[in-house]
Image: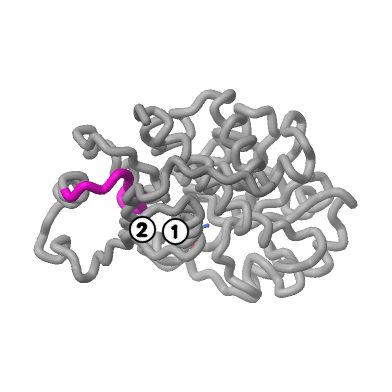
Amino acid sequence: MKILFTLDDLSEQEIHHILQEAETFKKGKTYDKLVGKKAANLFFEPSTRTHYSFVAAQQKFGMQVTNFNVEKSSIKKGESLYDTVKTFEMLGFDCLVIRHPQTNYFLELDNVSIPILSGGDGTGSHPTQSLLDLMTIKEEFKQFKGLKIAFIGDIMHSRVAHTNIKVMKRLGLECYVVDPFGLGAVEEKSIDIEEAIKEMDILMFLRIQFERHGYDLSVNPQTYHKEYGMTKERVQAMKDHAIIMHPAPYNRGVELSDYAVECEKSRIMKQMENGVYIRMAVLKEVFNHEPN
Ligand code: CP
């Protein structure tokens, strides 16, 4: 694997391999083949978890880390994404991590020779987020087949939902959606929120992405929370073994109550923690195609 833009690029076997590698890194395995390699992180959209878990993974490997500052760059003089990325290649960087608001931004990067890992493209894909979600689910349930998961929230604008639904169906999970806005771009089995709370093994809440709407959905946070949010009462109505997930950042008091964020059924902190190990695993994989 030289690039990771979508999980469609990976076979099931490759996905399981990355999850296993991430588990071994979590158990403390060390790896020194990337020491001194130069990584640049180009985030054209805000990020905390993805950006800094890549940084943490790169630092664990002893890589030299550069964080691109869009605001102080020649992007502000009109330079294109391709010309920016090609410049990083010519400057001698060994790999890039890119998050960009344009869906499928990577289609214009065919002529770039160094490894690139996507940190998310518009409303398209978020491959490493899905991998860390899969790792978290596997830790909990040991396997994927037959598990029921519902995605609750702003389905249409969620690259996490799009990526997860596609890969999770491949791996044998049953996927459902609760789509409060009725805008979901995916044709999935719809389920009522109260039914989802009682029936699902995994409830994955999604942030309302006000910044991507471009129009006013007139969402009242209190009304949304009452109708679709994870209240304490809904947590208590879940199956005993069921878990709560959220890619984060979350709108507290909207899709999740304060209680739900860190209650015993929440695996949200674990998702963040696992992000570092997944990003270590994918960094190792993208360099594996190269001769040592
Ligand atoms: N889950 C996620 O992608 O979070 P960030 O936007 O903080 O990276």
Mark 1 vs mark 2: which is more N-terminal?
1
Residue at disc 2, secondary structure: strand
Total tally of numbered discs in the picture:
2
What residue sits 48% from the left and 34% below the top?
A: 7
Reply yes or no: does residue 161 show up in magenta. no
User: For the magenta stretch, what is the residue range?
Assistant: 91-102
Task: Identify the residue position indicated by label 2 in the image.
Answer: 65
Distance from disc 1 to disc 2, alpha carbons, whole Å, reads 7 Å
Q: Amino acid at mark 1?
A: Val
Indicate the quadrant containing the C terminus: top left, top right, bottom left or bottom right: top left
Indicate the quadrant containing the N terminus: top left, top right, bottom left or bottom right: top left
Q: Quadrant of residue 225?
A: bottom right
What residue sits 36% from the left and 53% below the top?
A: 99
> Would you say 186 lies left or right of 42 here?
right
Mark 1–mark 2 CB contact (< 8 Å):
yes
Picture coordinates of residue 186, whole percent (x, y):
52, 39
Task: Identify the residue position indicated by label 1 in the image.
Answer: 55
Picture coordinates of residue 228, whole percent (x, y):
68, 62
> Would you say 129 lies left or right of 201 here?
left
Q: Residue furthest left?
A: 77
What residue sits 73% from the left and 56% below the top?
A: 244
Name the foreground residue: 73 vs 260.
Answer: 73
> Would you say 276 lies left or right of 118 here?
right
Task: Give neighbour class at mark 2: few <14, some 14-19, many 20+ (Cα, 10 Å).
Answer: some
What residue sits 77% from the left and 37% below the top?
A: 142
